[in-house]
Amino acid sequence: GQNIDQPTEMTATEGAIVQINCTYQTSGFNGLFWYQQHAGEAPTFLSYNVLDGLEEKGRFSSFLSRSKGYSYLLLKELQMKDSASYLCAVSSSNDYKLSFGAGTTVTVRA
Amino acid sequence: DARVTQTPRHKVTEMGQEVTMRCQPILGHNTVFWYRQTMMQGLELLAYFRNRAPLDDSGMPKDRFSAEMPDATLATLKIQPSEPRDSAVYFCASGQPGNTIYFGEGSWLTVV
């Protein structure tokens, strides 16, 4: 099975930077996803890391260390619309099973 | 824009009734996931399919839930009989192994 841990809540100020950590333990690893989910909506794709290192995409970056079972999502220049839940998900085993952490609720304050 | 389509978007039903939720995956995607989301449990994987074959349905209560893919363009999730504790949002997602997984907008189920 897999165990995926991320903080429950984070609060930051508009314009600031927030880093959301995710640690995982899994049998077999095929990649790590980050999704954003606004209240009452479906999760939307943010990033997908398969290899170690940093992937940058505009204001959002995602990092992966496979040896440490660790990833983070970095949100820069925070905007009010970034207030949402951020979900870490691991694709594992030979069958690319996708399992999610409980999500981190980020609140951006003016 | 290609998208995963789910029906119904919202459903209110009485306890004991049968509920069927449908999902049309994105054309060309051979992997389909069913998730349930509640405030308490987050996103739980209920079942998933590859090339229409079930790979894992261990997250699904077997006595009342069933999931099938009658063809490559349709996945179904059925609850019979429904209970109030089944009230949740049910998401379908599709993709290809090693690529992005896309979610449908969800079916919001309330069992009274």
Image (spheres, rainbow, N blue to C red):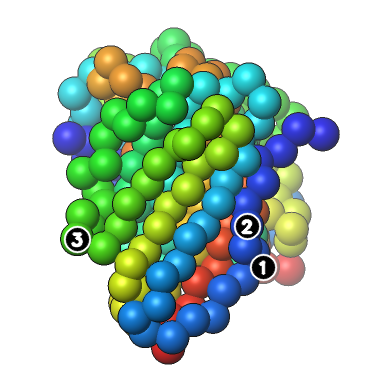
Identify residue for label 3: B63
Q: CA distance from mark 2 to mark 3?
A: 23 Å
Q: Nearer the viewer, mark 1 or mark 3?
A: 3
Q: Label for residue A109? A: 1
- Give the spatial CA distance, label 1 vs label 2: 36 Å
* Image location (x, y in percent) of residue A10: 48, 59
Q: Is A13 displayed left or right of A35 in the figure?
A: right
Q: Is residue B45 left or right of residue B25?
A: left
**Residue B7: which disc?**
2
Q: Are marks 1 and 2 in contact (CB under 8 Å)?
A: no
Residue B11 seen in the current view: yes
**From the viewer's perspective, is A35 left or right of B28?**
left
In the figure, B51 relative to A2: above or below? Answer: above
Chain ID of residue with mark 2: B
Above or below, A10 against B73 in this view is below
- Report how far apart the C-alphas of labels 1 and 3 lie in the structure: 46 Å
Which numbered marker is on residue A14? none
Q: How far from the left and from the top, in percent, is residue B61?
A: 22, 58
Secondary element type, mark 3: loop
What x and y, as percent, mark residue A43? 58, 49
Locate residue A61, reporting x and y percent.
60, 30
Q: Amino acid at mark 2?
A: Thr
Q: Is residue B67 above or below residue B107?
A: above
Circle 3 packing at 10 Å, graded few (<14), some (14-19), many (20+), is: few
- Of residues A9 and B90, the one nearer the viewer is B90
Q: Quadrant of the N terminus of chain B?
A: top right
Q: Residue furthest top?
A: A51
Residue at 54% in and 80% down? B12
Report the quarter where the C terminus of chain B lies: bottom left
Q: Chain of mark 1?
A: A
